Image (cartoon, helix red, strand yellow):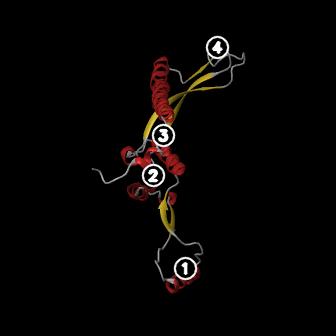
Amino acid sequence: MNEHDYAAFATDAPSPESVSDLAKCAIELAQAELEVARIEGELRAAKKRVEDISEHVLPDLMDLAGVSELALKNGTKLKIEPILTLGSGAGKNPEVLRWIEETGHSGLIKRSVSVLLGRDADERETTLLKDLAADGFTDVSALAEVNAQTLKAHVKRLLEAGKEVNMDLLGAREFKRAKITGQPKDGSSAFGE
């Protein structure tokens, strides 16, 4: 015979109706999650299609036609713009910073100094701050980085000047992208449809 008395739990058991409601709601949740996954998949596919058309198909077709801009009767324009992207955090990468210094552009690097003194370092902190203040430094911490937009502009200038740039080091890529600009004068969509 079992030494546990489970009879007390029987009164706390959910009713068959509430269990049925829970099951229905769980099924509804699973279906909603599947719908979200389906829609997110469709969105990813649509974004990939936009990327393919704007970064490959249209730039290639316009290159073949020998045009970089196409003006339409309704006032909109299709333009091909050069795009440069850099890898995330490229401006903080020590190898990128070394490359910038070695190529004579260390002025792009912003530097700051920060010191972690740990606990019970009040006296050391006071001494260090006094020494730095005596040298004219009032806001103290340590960091070396190049602003992302500054680095991007620098790389763009180098590329335009025909200089060699280690694109892999920077996580950089160059490509062209088609862009529709302007508003249709006739209230139609960009291409009159």
Name the residue beneath numbered marker 1.
132
Q: Position of residue 139 (x, y in %)?
A: 58, 72
Q: Residues within 10 Å of mark 2 (few under 14, many from 20)?
A: some
Q: CA distance from mark 4 to mark 1?
A: 66 Å
Amino acid under label 1?
Leu
> Which of the labelled discs sits on residue 14, or is there none?
3
Mark 1 element type:
helix
Q: CA distance from mark 2 to mark 1?
A: 30 Å
Tell us which disc is closer to us: 2 or 1.
Answer: 2
Q: Residues within 10 Å of mark 1 (few under 14, many from 20)?
A: some
Amino acid under label 2?
Gly
Q: CA distance from mark 3 to mark 2?
A: 54 Å
Q: Assign the C terminus to one quadrant of the image.
A: top right
Residue farthest to the front, as pictured: 1
Name the residue beneath numbered marker 4.
192
Rendered residue at 68%/16% (across/down): 188
- Res. 132 image quadrant: bottom right
Q: CA distance from mark 4 to mark 3?
A: 61 Å
